[in-house]
Structure formats: C-alpha cells, structure tokens
C-alpha cells in the first residue's frame, strides 16, 4: 500500500495492534487503535492505567517494551525530508537517525529516565552528538580558525582543526579512534568540541528555565529535584528540535506547583520549537489546558476523538461521559465508574466497555464498534451512534 | 580524583581500624576456647614434661586476665611476632612470607580471569537471553556452583596428569626447581612466571604456566558461577529500566546503550558481591593448593591445621582476615568510583 498522509498531517497510526506474550497469556494491549496528528497540533491521549496509551507512544518510536510485539497496523510519519515512512517498517539504522532527531519523548518519572551514573550534561550531549555532530564540528572549526587568525592558537589548535576536519569526513575513521586513545593528545583533541557542545547545552538549559545552568550541567541526576530532572529530560528531547514530541504523563510524578510550571514550559517551548505534541495523561484537567484535540483510549481501543472543547461540552462515548463525571467538583458527590478495567488477556467480547456501560445493548457484546465520524472532527466508536468509518474520510476530504 | 572521592577514601580507610580490631578480637576469642593447661600442653613433646605445665603457664602468662593476654598478644603481633610454627619449624610470620608468593601467583591469574570471563559471559547471556549462549552459561554456572573444588581438582589431575601426562602438580618441575635453587635463576618476586620473564627464561615461564593451568582452572570454574549469574540478572534488570528506553529514544545505538549505560549500572551489583568472591577465593585457595601440592599459604595452613599447629592457624586466620578487609576496602572504593550516589551521598 502506498504511504499517504494529507498535507497537513504529521502522523497517522492506523489499526495498530500490539500484543504482549506473557506466561499468563497474550495481553491484547493495543487493539486496532487509530490516531492522527496534524502538524503543530497537540493531541491529548487520555485513558486509565493499562489503556495502552504508553505502549502506543513507545511503539511510535519503535521501542515497544518486551515481551510486546506489534502484530498489525502501520504508523505513517512525515519525515524531516518530506518523505512519508511507515515507522514499523524502518531499519534499526534508520530508526537511530529518527529517534531523538525527528521524534523524541519525555517520560513519566524523570528520575528513572536519566542514567544515575552520568552527569546530566553528558546525557544531553549524547543527544546533540548523535544528531548534530556536523553542526557542532563546524562551530568548533570556526572558533579555532578565529583563534589561529588572531594568533592565539598554537599547535593544539592546529591539531584540533585537523581532527575536526577528519571527523567531518568520517567520524568513525580508525585513525581518529587511535588518536583519541593517546594520552594528553586524545584529551586535547576533544577540548574545543566539548566546549562548543557544553555552551550549546547551557543555552538549552537556560531555555528550560533552569537556574544556574553552569552548575546544573555538571550535576548528577540525584542532586536535582524532580522538576529540575524533568526539565533536563525535556532539554534532551528538544535538543535537536524534533518534529514530534511524545509526552508520557510528564507531570504525574511531580508536585502540583511544579506540574503547572512544567506544563507552562511545554506550552511555551512548543511555540518556540514548533513541534507537534502527543500528550498522554489520565488527568482531564491537564488535557483541557494543553491539547487541541483529544483521543480517549479504553482497554487498548481508541473510543473517541474530538476537539478539546467539543469533547468537554458534548462527549459522546459513555466512557468519556463517565470520565468527565468522575472529575471531582466541590459540592458534588464523588462519582466513580462502576466496575474495573478489564483483564486484557481475556478482554470482553464486542465493545470492551460493555460490561461497565449503562447503555449496553445485545449488539455491544457481539460486535466491535468501529471508530466512526459523527461531525466534521468528532469520531466515536460506539453502537449508539451511526456515522462513517474513520479510515474513509481521508480520501473524500 | 575529585575532592568528594578523596574524603570518601579517607573516611573508608579510618573505618578499617575498628574492623581490624574486631578481627583480632575474634581470632583471640578462639584461643580462649582452650583452657590454660591445654594451651600450655602445646609446648611439650613428652608426657614426662607434664610436670612443667604450671611453669609454662606462668612463663607465658596463660592464666592472666583475658584482656591482659589480649594486649600482650596484640603487642607481639604489632612487633611482627606471630609465634612459632611447629609444623614448619620457623616463625609464623616467616612461614607466611615464604608461602605468600605462590598464593599471590595463583590469585594473580585466577582473580582477573574469573572477573573478566564472568562479567563478559554474564553480559552476553543477558543480551542473548533464552538463546543457546544463555543456556550454555547457565549449565556452566550450575556445574561450577555445585562441584566441590577438591573433587574438580582431583578429576582434572586424574585426566590431565594421570591420563595425558601433562600439567603435573607442584609449582615447578624438578629441573626448574633445581635451577631456581642453584641461584642461576634470580628470584625477584617469588612469583615464578614474573621472575621467568625478568630472567628472560622462556622454558621456566612455560613450566610455571603449565603448573598453574589446573589450579587456576579449578579456582576460576568454582568462583565464576556466582559472578556470571549476578551479572546476568543484574544486566537483565538494567535493560528493562526506563533510562535504557530513554537513551534509545534520544537516538543512541543499541550497542552504545548496552556498553555505556546498562553495563556500568549492572557492574554495581557485581562489585558488591566481589567482596564475597574474595572469601570464596580464599577458601578455594586452601583446598586447591592442597590438592595440587601448590605450596602456598593455603597449603601451609591446611597442613598446620592437621598437625595442631595453633599459632600457624591463628596466623593464617589473621592473614585471611586482613586480606578480606583489604578486598572489601577496594570493593567500596570501586563502588564509589562507579556510583556518584555513594561518593556524594
């Protein structure tokens, strides 16, 4: 099949199926999920724990956690060169180029997302050196030439200049590897490059509104607060100005005041970097604040997609309605959704929500409802409504 | 070295003093299990000398209060006097020094081999989980872990020396030993492989190595199992961590993620257990040296024990305790070197 995206589309997840092969049985974590994302848009994905939101996000990076396996569907992504690729069909070589450069991710627990044994600066540098080495080398060469012209540079400047020009030709050349191993000379060679990268990192940290970035860059993760750690993780994600940022509950583990700051930061950075965002959360308040459109996931299915205002004003799916009613309000009694999230080894037949649904009909037990279009941008997967299939509109539009 | 690392090492060095005092207390306590008469009787050879027992007790202060005896002993130990080893007819300290090079030579080959092979195989088994490589290392670990070292040693001797006629016991063949005794071959360190290199004598080097092959194999096989399994499980645990996903998500190659991030984190638990590994090595040394007639400290201690040479056994206990304390010091320093949370915490 030809990989097609509409001109304004950045990403389309089509009929994605992810299953986990565990000893207890096959966990059907994501079952025919459909999503699409426009350029520059923030799509909120909301759902309970185990609804498949995080797995979907990781699968977009082709990093489905083991023992998970992608069993079907496609993830079409408009690359930086304008080409449309199915991420699930890319080679590991291509994926290494894509991850961190075109799509990057921020995580629920910043503390866990950083390697405790390396300074945070080193971890930001990894992202920069993986994708922006030529740019950094150019800067270093520029600065060295300047030094030599002003008569400040000596032998070491010339040596570095030679090394960087060689690196530009082939960074993995054997002679470079050998020279780097030499005592003193090895260190001398990376001096300017390190300095250039360090300056870049400090600038990046300043953008993240990190106070005293010169100190923080040399800190270990455990020396920073949760909020600061999350800013570092965001800095890593944005270090190469990606096209798409996957945010997997980035504020869940933080204090409420810090949550607001981080949310604020993401909103502002989005404008600056112009990335599309998929923001995953179970917090309807956060969804209302940050997203343009919302996709509601339940037990591995996308059950409703709508612009944020419409979703809050006119929710269609019984699950969405229940979710919105479950938001605690002062004065009102606390409402929870009866029943529990289904076991995904043996999910309910038909619509996976039917055992908890107040409107369940006999049809719901037999037939899986398709995601159907109700109004221009409102889709729902529920037998209570008619509408046309999700995949079909892209041809008619 | 950073300032934090220096403070950590100094703090850790100071901590050795109470630990060593504890070691001496424990060793001293063992001697107190015997009555003064029993201890005095070690000094006599003939039943007719039994009448001298009271004077011996008096002479060596064996009936004095316990703490005075302890301080007297410590005073002697600090002056390098560990007593007389009857079984080898020399002072205990001299016996320790004489036998040390052989043990050091065994450890010099067995310890690095165990550590390097153990870590590499454990890492490989984790990366290639549930493949043939993984199963092979698991079988190796079970064999190594469950075989008694004396049995393995005897089997190796039976096959290679008894059956094939190569790899004989002892430290050197007779001709090489004569060469060493003749004085033509200069002994610098007492480690014959090193001395052979310093003497530029290839024949002695080969001979020494061929004598090391079996005992080193025994020690490595016995000790590698634990290390390999710890490395494997620790590596598997690390590979499932979020920072590994995060490192891949920023575009690092899988190999870089494994070598730079996961392995370093996995090594923390390996370093932690390598203190225990030293204990395994020391006890393995006693048995291995005895089986292979490799005349090191373990061989000497085992023979002293069978001849009720109490000062020698105490000397060995003191030696083993000190080695163990030093090994754990190194482990703790390595630990801090790898993990910033330890040295800055």
Image (spheres, coloured by chain):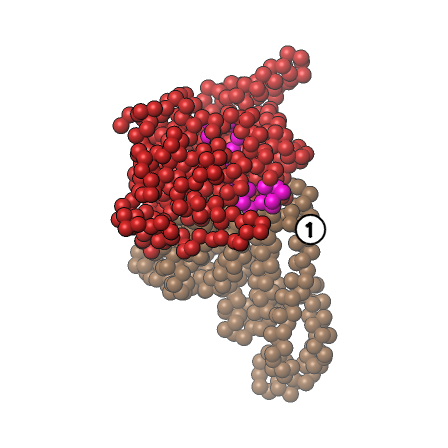
Chain colours: A red, B brown
Q: Examine the rendered structure and indicate whether residue B197 appears above or below residue A99.
A: below
Q: Which of the pair B35/B90 is nearer the observer?
A: B35
> Neighbour class for label 1 at 10 Å: few (<14), some, many (≥20)?
few
What count of labels does the image hold?
A: 1
Residue in the image at 63% along x and 42% along y: A257
Q: Examine the rendered structure and indicate whether residue A217 appears above or below residue A156.
A: below
Q: Which of the pair B282/B169 is nearer the observer?
A: B282
Residue A202 is drawn in which quadrant? top right
Left/right of residue A12 with respect to residue B191 in the rendered view? left
- Rendered location of residue B185, percent (x, y): 51, 48
Left/right of residue B78 with respect to residue B207 in the rendered view? right
Q: Which residue is mark 1?
A: B10
Q: Which of the pair B288/A307 is nearer the observer?
A: A307
Residues drawn in magenta: A237-259
Q: Quadrant of the N terminus of chain A?
A: top left
Q: Which of the pair A355/B240 is nearer the observer?
A: A355
Can the viewer see residue B325 in this picture?
yes
- Rendered location of residue B344, percent (x, y): 65, 47
Residue A161 is drawn in which quadrant? top right
Residue in the image at 45% along x and 26% along y: A39
Residue A256 counted in the magenta span: yes
Can the viewer see residue B117 in this picture?
no
Q: Examine the rendered structure and indicate whether residue A208 appears above or below residue A301.
A: above
Left/right of residue B97 with respect to residue B78 in the rendered view? left
């Amino acid at each position: 099949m030809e990989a097609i995206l509409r001109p304004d589309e950045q990403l389309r997840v089509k009929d994605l199926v992810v299953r986990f092969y565990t000893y207890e049985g096959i966990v059907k974590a994501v079952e025919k999920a459909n999503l699409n994302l426009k350029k520059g848009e923030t799509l909120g994905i909301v759902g309970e724990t185990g609804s498949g939101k995080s797995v979907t996000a990781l699968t977009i990076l082709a990093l489905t956690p083991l023992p998970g396996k992608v069993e079907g569907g496609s993830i079409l992504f408009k690359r930086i060169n304008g080409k449309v690729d199915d991420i699930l069909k890319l080679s590991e070589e291509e994926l290494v180029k894509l991850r961190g450069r075109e799509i990057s991710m921020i995580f629920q627990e910043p503390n866990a997302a950083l390697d405790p044994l390396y300074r945070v600066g080193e971890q930001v540098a990894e992202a920069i050196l993986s994708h922006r080495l030529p740019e950094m080398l150019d800067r270093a060469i520029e600065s060295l030439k300047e030094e030599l012209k002003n008569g400040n540079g000596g032998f070491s400047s010339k040596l570095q200049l030679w090394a960087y020009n060689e690196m530009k030709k082939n960074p993995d050349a054997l002679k470079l590897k050998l020279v780097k191993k030499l005592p003193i000379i090895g260190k001398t060679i990376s001096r300017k490059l390190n300095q250039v990268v360090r300056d870049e990192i400090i600038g990046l940290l300043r953008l993240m509104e990190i106070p005293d970035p010169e100190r923080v860059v040399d800190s270990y993760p455990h020396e920073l607060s949760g909020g600061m750690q999350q800013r570092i993780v965001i800095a890593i994600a944005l270090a190469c100005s990606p096209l798409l940022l996957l945010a997997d509950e980035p504020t869940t583990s933080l204090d409420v005041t810090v949550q607001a700051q981080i949310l604020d930061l993401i909103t502002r950075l989005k404008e600056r970097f112009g990335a599309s965002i998929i923001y995953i959360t179970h917090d309807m308040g956060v969804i209302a604040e940050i997203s343009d459109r919302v996709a509601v996931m339940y037990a591995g299915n996308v059950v409703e997609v709508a612009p944020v205002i419409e979703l809050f004003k006119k929710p269609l799916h019984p699950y969405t309605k229940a979710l919105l009613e479950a938001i605690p309000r002062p004065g009102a009694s606390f409402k929870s959704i009866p029943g529990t999230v289904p076991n995904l080894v043996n999910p309910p037949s038909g619509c996976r929500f039917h055992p908890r649904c107040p409107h369940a009909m006999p049809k719901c037990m037999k037939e899986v409802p398709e995601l159907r279009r109700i109004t221009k941008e409102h889709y729902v997967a529920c037998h209570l409504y008619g509408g046309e299939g999700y995949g079909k509109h892209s041809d008619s539009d | 070295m950073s300032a934090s690392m220096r403070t950590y090492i100094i703090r850790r060095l100071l901590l050795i003093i109470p630990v060593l005092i504890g070691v001496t207390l424990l060793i001293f306590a063992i001697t107190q299990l015997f009555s003064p008469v029993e201890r005095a009787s070690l000094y006599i050879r003939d039943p007719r000398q039994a009448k001298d027992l009271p004077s011996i007790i008096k002479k060596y202060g064996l009936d004095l209060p316990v703490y005075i005896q302890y301080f007297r002993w410590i005073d002697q130990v600090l002056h390098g006097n560990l007593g007389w080893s009857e079984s080898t007819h020399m002072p205990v300290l001299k016996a320790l020094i004489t036998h040390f090079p052989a043990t050091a030579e065994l450890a010099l080959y067995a310890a690095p081999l165990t550590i390097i092979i153990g870590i590499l195989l454990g890492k490989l088994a984790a990366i290639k989980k549930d493949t043939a490589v993984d199963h092979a290392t698991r079988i190796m670990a079970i064999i190594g872990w469950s075989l008694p070292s004396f049995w393995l040693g005897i089997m190796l001797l039976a096959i290679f020396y008894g059956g094939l006629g190569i790899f004989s016991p002892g430290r050197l063949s007779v001709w090489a030993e004569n060469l060493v005794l003749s004085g033509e071959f200069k002994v610098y360190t007492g480690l014959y492989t090193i001395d052979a290199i310093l003497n530029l004598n290839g024949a002695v080097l080969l001979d020494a190595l061929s004598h090391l092959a079996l005992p080193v194999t025994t020690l490595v096989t016995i000790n590698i199992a634990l290390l390999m399994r710890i490395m494997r499980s620790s590596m598997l645990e690390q590979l499932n961590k979020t920072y590994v996903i995060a490192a891949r998500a920023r575009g690092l190659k899988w190999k870089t993620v494994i070598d730079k991030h996961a392995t370093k984190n996995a090594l923390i638990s390996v370093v932690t257990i390598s203190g225990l590994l030293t204990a395994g090595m020391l006890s393995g040394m006693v048995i291995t040296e005895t089986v292979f007639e490799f005349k090191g400290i373990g061989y000497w201690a085992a023979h002293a024990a069978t001849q009720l040479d109490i000062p020698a056994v105490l000397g060995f206990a003191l030696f083993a305790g000190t080695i163990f304390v030093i090994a754990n010091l190194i482990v703790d320093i390595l630990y801090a070197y790898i993990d910033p949370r330890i040295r800055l915490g």
